[in-house]
Image (cartoon, rainbow, N blue to C red):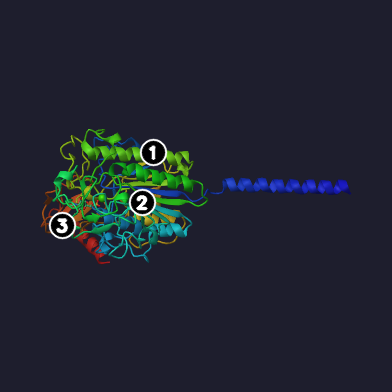
Amino acid sequence: MKNRSQSFIAILLGMVFFLACQDKEVDEEAPSKKPNIVFIYMDDLGYGDVSAYKAGKLQTPNMDKLANGGVRFTNGYASSATCTPSRYAILTGTYPWRNQDAKILPGTAPLLIDTAQLTLPKILQNQGYHTAVIGKWHLGLGRGNVDWNQQIKPGPNEVGFDFSHIMAATQDRVPTVYIENGQVVNLDPNDPIQVDYDQNFEGEPTAISHPELLTMKWHHGHNNSIVNGVPRIGFMKGGTSAKWSDVDMADHFLAKAQEYVLEKAQSDSPFFLYYGLQQPHVPRTPHPRFEGKSGMGPRGDVILEADWVIGEFIKTLEEAGILENTLIVFTSDNGPVLNDGYYDDAVEKLGDHTPAGPLRGGKYSLFEAGTRVPFVTYWKGKIQPGVSDALVTQIDLLASLSALVGSEQSAPDSQNLLDTFLGKSEKERDAFVLEATTKTALRQGDWIMIPPYPGPAVQNQVNIELGNSSDYQLYNLKEDLEQQNNLASSNPEKLQEMIRKYEEIRGS
Ligand code: NG6
Ligand code: CA
């Protein structure tokens, strides 16, 4: 009896062991957890600023690692030639020109995204993702009249981010403090912060009243409050202990991003990190480690700083063992500008570097350099390296990534180009209405049509051609990437076709 029951137990144990092994095998074969998704979103980085695009002289080895190891898009577009509208579009999958408030925002602007609106981070949250934004926000906070000394809401945490560590607007706008989950970091309650974009606070020095306090000189705009010797847009008083150090900003955001991914690498759920770098937007304040490194002045130096940051960040993903399970989207919110309001030698020391590559225009422009930006998808071991000429836009990331994570949620303007982003297809967007300071143009196939607009042909302060003309403009970008031959009068059929399509989309 004893023997029989013993052998019965042995058989039972054997079966349990066998089943356990089976389970393990099944586990190993099952698709691993959903991929982490990281956006590395640059600020004002041009098509020619990334050496992998072979269109400029600056060397960016770490950005190149992404670009040459993933799909490098040559027709990848930001939705707008300025920051806020592009950021609005990448998060909502919606054309920014549908929202008349989607324009460059002051630091005191209310939250631009409706808290009821669908956003990419919300879609990902619904699929079990932990979501975070670290870096530049510039989409407004609160509902107007924010008290910076209290909990600031609504903000990123109310539109889909579980964690936020941000600068409110831009590096050149007050408040010059970091805000974590709605709280100003390191704020001393005895030294409250006040912010105003119309009026100075009595007795506070400005760039006009105290030019001797400046370590960086302003060229246009940027003559209000002085922080760290840099004159800013807007007035600010108090909050001394909370003020950021400009030269440490890159290290600061990097440390936060590293801390976040290291923590989430331990977790069972995937994460989405929207990492908004501040470079090479003005004021360009490289850490002393990078000063003079590019030989192109601070603009080149901060791009090298950002490149180093990206290299460190990728190393962190690698060391955490999650690089193979992380899809990285690397791109920029709009095209390049040299003099954007400070005397910082960006023009003088440029040398033979071409931030826009062969493209016409720049930031603020309807011409290609305004919105055609470096755009890369990278996923080690999953995406085959390659170059794609397919027309893709940042608006399409919402529908595409929604499909990737198995969600059915989407937004009407966003097109599912997942296979293109994964390098498996050349399917492209059928048509795209790009935006530049509230003006719009139609990009479709090899063509772009720019309607007539009043206004100067060139914005003299920044020295950029804006695309304004009293005539229709029609360019074949395949044959004329530099937009030198306006075919509007020689190809009236194409022009009419483009106008019809443009009106159809704008009217919808
Ligand atoms: C402009 C600023 C410019 C920059 C830009 C926003 C002046 C004269 N110019 O108004 O320096 O801050 O806004 O850039 O103030 S963006 O990349 O965030 O859109
Ligand atoms: Ca920008």
The residue that label 3 is drawn on is 492
| Disc 1 versus disc 3: nearer the observer | 1
Cα gap from disc 2 to disc 3, whole angstroms? 61 Å
Which mark is on residue 312?
Answer: 1
Separation (CA) of disc 1 from disc 2: 26 Å
Q: Quadrant of residue 175?
A: bottom left
- Secondary structure of the residue carrying numbered label 1: helix
Q: Position of residue 307 (x, y in %)?
A: 32, 39
N-terminal label among 1 and 3: 1
Amino acid on which the number 3 mark rests in the picture: Pro
Relative horizontal placement of residue 46, taking residue 35 as reference (left or right): left
Residue 47, given in percent of the width and then of the height, sits at 26, 43
Tell me the kind of residue under disc 2.
Asn
Asked whether residue 69 appears in the rendered view, the answer is no
In depth, the one of 240 and 123 nearer the eye is: 240
Label whose residue precedes the other's in the sequence (2 or 3) = 2
Regarding mark 3 in the picture, which secondary structure is present there? helix
Circle 3 packing at 10 Å, graded few (<14), some (14-19), many (20+), is: few
Name the residue: 21% across, 41% down: 358
Find disc 2 in the rendering and name its residue: 186
